[in-house]
Amino acid sequence: MMRFSGVCSAIVLVVLSGFAHAEQEAWALFDKVQHAVQQYNFDTSFVVLKGTKVDTYRWLHGRTDTQEIEHLIPLDTSGVDILRRDSVVYYLLTDRPAFVTRSSSIPELPSLLFEPKSKVSELYNAIAGSSAVMSGRNAQLLRLTAKQSSRYNYWLWLDAETGFPLRIDTLSEQQTPLERWLVTHMQISPELPENLRALMDADLPAPADSIDKALPQTSHQLTWLPDGYQQVTEPATIPQLENSLLSYWLLTDGLHQVSVFVQNSQRLPTQAYRDGATTIFVQAGNKMEVTVIGPVSIDTARQLAASVQ
Amino acid sequence: MSSEHQDWLSAASDNNALTKAQLDRLLSDAELQNTLARYNLIGATLRRETHSPLQANFSDDVMLQLADEPVYNLQSNRSMLQRIKSAVAVAANGTWLQPVAQGAIAAGVALMAVFGVQQYQQSPEAALSPQPLLQTQPIAGFATPVSLSQTTVSDRFAEQEQQAMLEQQKRLQALLNAHRQQVRVMEQAQQASHNTPDTGTGQNEQ
């Protein structure tokens, strides 16, 4: 009997250590992706597929000994040139002065590639998948499976040689693809791309030191938060909605952001839309209308809207 | 002419073997040759073989006839196809063709299966084509991109309410833009709030 239990525990130990090893290997792949997009000099193009909508971008990144520069250019007519120098992000508008914020990454890029591993591993399990050939390159699959089923899953394919991400699929909890981020061209070079060198020294406005805060707080309360989410304590004001907005909350789990808007009722039915992985849920009511926008499932959005009192 | 002569000549005419000396004598003596011819004639007459089916000079007649024959053009003018046809016709009568043909059909089927399956397996790679494979997922029974026309849950909207729908569309787009703007400035907002001592990060504020 002793021998039997000994054998059993040995098997369990071997299996567990096998899992632990696989998990470690997968997180090593994750490190490789982040290292590639944050350290290499590259010039790439990618598309974002949202249902029938396709957005195309060019994405350049460069590093010198002291500085980091990143440029995201939408190749469609509508869109804003976004430039990041170290931790300042510039939205270069054509008709207005540049809009400047402080951020260590461009929020329009998949946040998965920039958020610290400790934060991502709180929310996701990593599993290394099989390898495949993608755009003529050897690609390794890395699956990030949400620990809470309400969160979307990610499948990453990274270039086996460089670790550069080739494709990122966002999947619903039923594993239905919602959004696909796909690299169509990639060039990694030892030197800083030439057109970034000029932007490195370009004269750009300084970020605003203080942002307007303190939305007029009203009697509404948000009584429930999805697992892992917390409120951003002082979200910025939204001047364009000042007149119609009764309450506003911004929630984040470190990787995703969800907005909850409360407005006067427009006497329209409850409805829901989807823009790629972003859900837009409108909860109608007699006195107020709650709109939830963010990368959450329809059920989570409904629950969140219902929790406004 | 001695009887001795006649004996061995007579024997020779009956196909008996000659000695070397007898043969030499026969070849050198014309008289003996005539005698042998006569013996053979007598023998043939006795065996009733006088009516020979062929004249002694029949070959001359054949040559004469051939000389009168018109010349046919006998060059081979059959096409490759005809030759293959005839070759196949010959082969079809051979016992080896049937098993070979069966083998060829089996190999063809196997090749089709292999390549057909490979092509089928390759089809997911078509995902790399620009055609978007993602389909907007219906939520709450319907699905509409925000930027396009909408359908409602009740789906009972009258014409005069279309205007209201457009208004709603605009409002939603404004809210979506506001959400994106919030995401853009969020890190800055958080950095600002980190400067105050009592930030509630790390806790759920329920």
Image (cartoon, coloured by chain):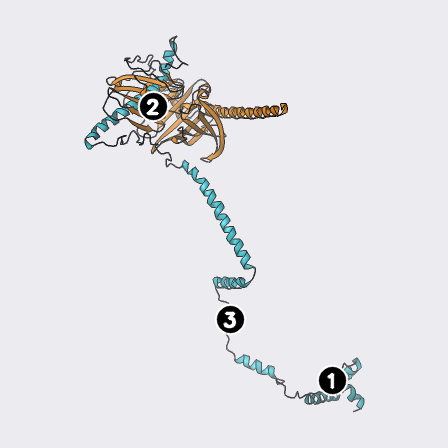
Chain colours: A orange, B cyan
Say whether mark 2 and mark 1 are on the same chain: no
Give the alpha-carbon distance from disc 1 to disc 3, as whole Å: 48 Å
Which is in the foreground here, disc 3 or disc 2?
Answer: 2
- Is residue A217 shown left or right of residue B56? left
**Disc 3 marks which residue?**
B74
Outermost residue toward the left in this view: B160
**Disc 2 marks which residue?**
A301
Q: Residues within 10 Å of mark 1 (few under 14, many from 20)?
A: few
Task: Return the chain for callout 3.
Answer: B
Q: Position of residue B32 (x, y in %)?
A: 75, 87
Which is in the foreground here, disc 1 or disc 2?
Answer: 2
**Disc 1 marks which residue?**
B14
Does A200 sit above or below residue B23? above
Task: Return the chain for callout 2.
Answer: A
- Is residue A149 shown left or right of residue B49? left
Q: Are marks 1 and 2 in contact (CB under 8 Å)?
A: no
* Residue A195 placement: quadrant: top left
Give the alpha-carbon distance from disc 1 to disc 2, as whole Å: 129 Å
Which is in the foreground here, disc 1 or disc 3?
Answer: 1
